[in-house]
Amino acid sequence: MRVPTILLGHLTNVMTTSPSVPSANIQVKLPDGTLGEHPPQTTPMDIARSISDGLARSVIAAEIDGKIVDAFRTFEELADQTDGPLELKLLTSRDPEALGVLRHSAAHVMARAIMRLYKGVSLAFGPTTEGGFYYDFDLEHRLTEEDFPKIEAEIKKIIKDKEPFERFSVPRDEARKLCADLDQDLKVEHIETGLSDQETLSFYRQGEFVDLCRGPHIPDAGKIKAIKMMSVAGSHWKGDTSGRSLQRLYGTAFFDKKELAAYLEQIEEAKRRDHRVLGKQHGLFSINPEVGQGLCLWLPKGARVRVALEDFLRKELLSRGYDPVYSPHIGRVEMYETSGHFPYYRDSQFAPLFGSEVGGMLDAWSERLKDDKLSSDDEDKLIAAAEVFGVKLPDYKPSASSDKKRDVLNAWQHEHERYLLKPMNCPHHCYIFKSQPRSYRQLPMRLFEFGTVYRHEQTGELNGMLRVRGLTQDDAHIFCTADQVEQEFKATIELTKFVLNAVGLTDYRVQLSLRDPDSNKYVGSEENWDHAEGALRGVLENSGLDFNEEPGEAAFYGPKADFMVRDCIGRSWQLGTVQLDYNLPERFKLEYNGADNSAHRPVMIHRAPFGSVERFTGMLIEHFAGAFPMWLSPEQIRVLPLSDKSLEYAAAVCRQLCDAGLKATVDNTGGKVQAKIRNAQLDLVNYMAVVGPKEAETGQIALRDRIDGDLGSMPTAEAIARLQKEIADRSVRQVVQGASAAASVESSAVGDEY
């Protein structure tokens, strides 16, 4: 927000008002164990200066007791009331966490430049993303890429001035008035509706620019050494498509120009590997709007890849004591109400299915009654319309509240069968467990299913195979005793590692997703949550895996371990997941008969090494740039006859290869063999078998490797044995050689707008 001159004096007074100074010094502990006492007004930057001026110049932010904060905030502000010293770590550009702080500050700098260049700008939010940052604006000027040079030039002026980021806090009412005086109506609305429980709000000022923000930020804009505008897109206020339309400007920033150059090269390489382009080019999958957006059609070649993946995992699961099950594609709404998926995930599910059109209309009307924009008369009209359709609502009174009217409609719906397209497999598996009495001797019970589920993702969020509306999960649920949890969870972690290693994905870390203790979106008792989170943490600590904890990222019913995998060009993907759940067994009243002949509640583990077959395959297409390893390849070897005279022998060789379990085809088109070789290489076929009169006479083939070229003539049986061994070894040799690497840069999204 650009501050009018008349407000600058007021802000100066606010920012220079000092809190009361406590008498006691504050203990601070450094990473090397050094312990010291400092006055309450000391800042992390003061500590850095006391060590060396060079360190002070390098400091970007600080980490205190695990929380990233401004380096210029006082220990008095940052100290909590717990006993013990503050654990202080000074963050420099060498620390991964610092990049997120830099990018969050770059979002403010970009917003400041926009406000300098254009009139009537209303600010929304400007958080970091995995690869950079964005800011949402409401302004009359329609931003395009042609504006980027002008915006970047203004940003460079701001960076050159190296003005500091200054933080100040004011009471909520004063914060509202300040935003109103600055004509920032979106911020005013957010203070009134989104921050109504906050007594004090913080702002950051840089020169004439002030923004409502939690922080943290870099000491000054001069720390930004490389910045670039990336793209512009439409958005909506708080993501509500029925709300105010905004413009979203994306950018990225780094501490070094070389890092920016490497990132831009990674972006270009990612474009070359776009699975949507390669999928169409190589006939792997198709998404046709006449079938439905987000609904994937697996073409023959893509289906072969999918079958290979499913067969590989199915065989492994059977060997590890899992039992296959199948469940229907729909289920009664009441089942998902019991599990908590409905209405918890209401917005991402397809509307309930009823036996009549009346039921569908009542469901829609019931949802409309949530809208406080409806007048009482409008609400009564909805009820009256329901009665016209023959719906009997004996408990309805015109004077009833909106909630009561909604309860009346919902009561009618509950008297009729309602179905959902299956959004999750787990409730179905709960009823499979519950279908007959269970004994502790049967546990652990491991059920698996390649189950297709349906999510009503927003159209703008759909992305080829990576974000779809119909997805097949390699879903499994383990029902076990409390004593078996640790071993079973450990086994699922090992299974996920095995699956990722099989496709050459060895660069990964684990994210332990925990609940946010301040949120009420989670189900189950605090005791169960503490127990579940402790169990997962213990297994990961003992596994030796690199993992980090992320509060607020847990599923609504339990904590989970997500595998964050880096592909060959350094991008991070969330793939396999393992979730521990004490809540669904409670909700579905699942029981087994224990050794003491009493009923006990099992523990439930959800796990999916692929995550979804669609997303996993889409990621592999990009990771391998379409050049699948031999064991996954949809066309492993193509037989190339030198001329039509060799077609009969080529067909016989192809049959021999297919009988041996290889995916083989014959190129029976006309033309020279050199053209056939080139076409096979462009189609990313792993091997070629050239045959002519000489090979037909000796019963051999001339084998060619797509990467290494001519391997010489050999008997067909010898070639088959060679290829079968490569498949059995699940080698990724060709993929590694064929992949073009780019420097990888990963940001940590720290800091956020309110």
Image (tube, rainbow, N blue to C red):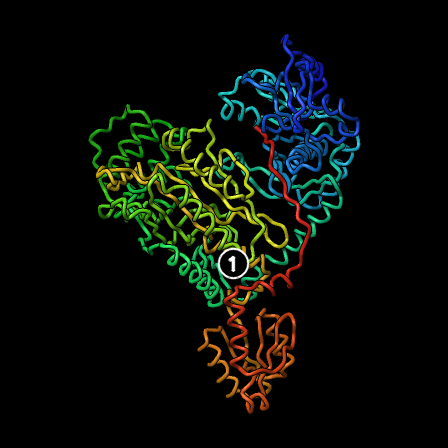
Tag 1's secondary structure?
helix
Residue 563 at x, y = what percent? 51, 46
Which residue does the numbered mark 1 point to in the structure image? 502
Q: How many numbered discs?
A: 1
User: Does residue 12 appear in this view?
Assistant: yes
At label 1, counting other C-alpha atoms closer than 10 Å, the crowd grade (few under 14, some 14-19, many 20 or more) is some
User: Does residue 184 appear in this view?
Assistant: no
Classify 576 as above or below 594.
below
Residue situated furthest front in the rendering: 595
Residue 9 at x, y = what percent? 71, 14
Q: Quadrant of residue 625?
A: bottom right
Residue 139 at x, y = what percent? 63, 34
| Residue nearer the viewer, 128 or 21 | 21
Residue 455 at x, y = what percent? 42, 47
Q: Quadrant of the C terminus?
A: top right
| Residue nearer the viewer, 420 or 361 | 420
Q: Amino acid at mark 1?
A: Ala
Classify 475 as above or below 725.
above
Seen at 45% across and 58% down, the residue is: 296
Seen at 31% across and 53% down, the residue is: 327
Seen at 35% across and 50% down, the residue is: 446
Q: Quadrant of residue 377?
A: top left
Q: Quadrant of the N terminus?
A: top right
| Residue nearer the viewer, 627 or 423 | 627
